[in-house]
């Protein structure tokens, strides 16, 4: 019963709809509560499964034409037929406009949402990293043969960051690297993917949604797409991003 009040707001937390300070409080609780972390992980996995299932079928032009022909082949009263065609026309116009709008905006926002989900799911996991080491010369070679690209890790000496380890991850079925860093007791995720393997909409995904509860930076460099995300301060996110830019 102790965690009931927390679990009631887990979905709001996972959707990134909490205030920044509440998000940090939830992060701390989830990291230290096995029950809530397991529940959060299960909900994130369920959310991603629904998202993948929803993308299995997208109506195309052929389907639209078939529906129009089906309507046209069964004429009834002229008034009803005219109403149906008008309604179909409105539906198609609205659908086209909505599809274009969502494709440009929601597609990009969905990517950032998935990155946030990956970050939260990893922190909620009982095994957040597959290779545990503070040595970049141990973590970097671990990825060889597991992902189709190589990347450099920054030197952290005299910085406020410490490397905790890394793991493999996937973004829309694209394999990548997930590094986890610590800064003043805040965990920061760094994701690295091969740019050419990602959806085309990511090539200009520089506008991060304002509603995202985490601080994030993303950029493309050397054919790779980087994401730095966490509940650390914007200054810390920027500092770690600059270290990666320099290392690359």
Image: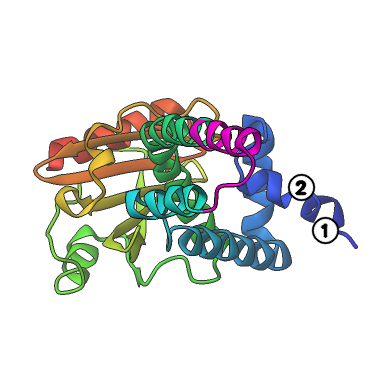
Question: Within 10 Å of the Cα at label 1, are there few (<14), some (14-19), or many (20+) other Cα atoms?
Answer: few
Residue 13: tell me if it is visible: yes
Residue ranking furthest to the right: 1
Q: Nearer the viewer, residue 207 or 50?
A: 50
Residue at which label 2 appears: 9
Q: Is residue 107 above or below residue 97?
A: below
The quarter of the image holding the C terminus is: top left
**In this rendering, position of residue 208 left or right of residue 218:** right
Q: Is mark 2 in CB contact (under 8 Å) with mark 1?
A: no
Tell me the distance, in whole angstroms, between the alpha carbons under discs 2 and 1: 10 Å
Of the image marks 2 and 1, the number of the one nearer the N terminus: 1
In the rendered image, which quarter is residue 111 located in? top left
Task: Name the secondary structure under disc 1.
Answer: loop
Q: Indicate the quadrant where residue 18 lies.
A: top right
Mark toward the viewer: 2 or 1: 2
Q: How many residues crowd mark 2 within 10 Å: few (<14), some (14–19), many (20+)?
A: few
Q: Residue at x 21, y 68 (%)?
A: 143
Callout 2: helix, strand or loop?
loop
- Residue at image position (50%, 59%) is 54
Magenta stretch? 74-89
- Most distant residue in the front direction: 77
On whether residue 81 falls in the magenta region, the answer is yes
Q: Which residue is mark 1?
A: 3
């Amino acid at each position: 019963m102790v965690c009931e009040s927390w679990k009631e707001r887990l979905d709001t937390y996972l959707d990134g709809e909490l205030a920044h300070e509440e998000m940090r409080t939830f992060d701390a609780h989830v990291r230290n509560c096995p029950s809530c972390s397991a529940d959060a992980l299960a909900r994130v996995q369920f959310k991603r499964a629904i998202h993948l299932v929803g993308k299995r079928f997208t109506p195309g032009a052929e389907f639209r034409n078939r529906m129009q022909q089906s309507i046209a082949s069964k004429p009834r009263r002229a008034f009803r037929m005219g109403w149906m065609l008008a309604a179909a026309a409105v539906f198609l116009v609205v659908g086209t406009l909505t599809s274009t709008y969502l494709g440009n905006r929601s597609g990009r926002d969905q990517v950032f949402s998935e990155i946030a989900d990956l970050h939260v799911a990893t922190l909620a996991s009982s095994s957040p990293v597959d290779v545990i080491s503070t040595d970049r010369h141990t973590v970097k070679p671990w990825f060889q043969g597991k992902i189709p690209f190589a990347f450099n890790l920054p030197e952290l000496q005299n910085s406020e960051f410490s490397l905790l380890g890394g793991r493999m991850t996937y973004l829309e079925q694209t394999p990548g690297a997930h590094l986890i860093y610590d800064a003043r007791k805040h965990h920061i995720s760094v994701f690295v993917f091969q740019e050419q393997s990602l959806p085309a909409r990511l090539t200009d995904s520089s506008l991060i949604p304002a509603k995202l509860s985490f601080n994030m930076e993303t950029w493309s460099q050397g054919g790779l797409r980087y994401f730095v995300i966490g509940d650390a301060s914007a200054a810390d996110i920027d500092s770690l991003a600059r270290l990666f830019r320099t290392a690359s």
